[in-house]
Image (cartoon, grey):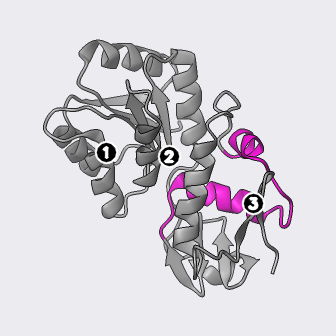
Amino acid sequence: MEQKKRVLIIEDEKNIVDIIRFNLDREGYEVLEAYDGEAGLALARSEKPDIILLDVMLPKMIGFDVCRALRGEGDNVPVIILTAREEEEDKVLGLEIGADDYITKPFSMRELIARVRANIRRTAMAAPAASADEGMSAGGGLTINTDNLQVYKHGTPIDLTQREYELLTFLASHPDKVFSRVDLMEQVWNFAFVGDDARTVDVTVRRLREKIEDDPGNPAYILTRRGVGYYYSAH
């Protein structure tokens, strides 16, 4: 029997937690709960969930700091930021510090479940014995190992989030083909209803460039076709 995927909810409003838990239970997920940032971070470290739903405004430790701490420790568990705020800056900051996605309250359970499902597709890392030699060459010293979901540059592993990995893999598998932001939201993020949030794609591209490019300001791998979108340069 396949083990249930584990969702950690870090949210201080109990009524919201109860509603989310009920719906996730019904979809077959195992649910863990924390009502402040410190407790949530401790649970994330000890229980290793498959995905985290993370509120921004939390007692003891805000959601952004929880996400920063996990990413700083090399934990690339998918994180969906839950925020009641509409400000673009909050959404961008969440992505900048390594969150994979965000959803603004109030949200429909159908939308939340769709995002959980989309973000949880890439799960456990495979055998650490796998190496760059076993991967797909992406040119310019980059190798993508689709068995252990690891990217290497000149044989050295690069620490990417789920979304960064999936964006790079998608673009590299279609070299020199230009994709608009809406295309990428649909193909990589797996949902069209946030296609107007172009900054989501822009921020993820910027973070990815900072990790894989020798000179992020003058990229060699992921290039921009002005007014159209992004493409992967086949060297």
Which residue type does callout 1 highlight? Phe
Give the residue at mark 2: 100
User: Could you say which disc has been placed on residue 64 in the image?
Assistant: 1
Circle 3: residue type: Leu
Give the extent of the magenta segment: 159-188
Callout 2 amino acid:
Asp
Q: Say which label, 3 or 1, has the lower sequence index.
A: 1
Residue 131 appears in the rendering: no
Q: Which residue is mark 3?
A: 171
Residue in the foreground of this view, choosing between 213 and 124: 213
Q: Residue 197, how many percent across, how many down?
A: 61, 37
Q: Secondary structure at mark 3?
A: helix
How far across and down, in percent of the image, does residue 134 sit? 67, 78
Which structural element holds mark 1? helix
Q: In the image shown, does 105 or 78 lie closer to the viewer?
A: 105
Q: Residues within 10 Å of mark 2 (few under 14, many from 20)?
A: many
Indicate the quadrant where residue 75 lies: bottom left
Principal SS element in the magenta part?
helix
Whether the magenta-drawn stretch holds residue 163 is answered as yes
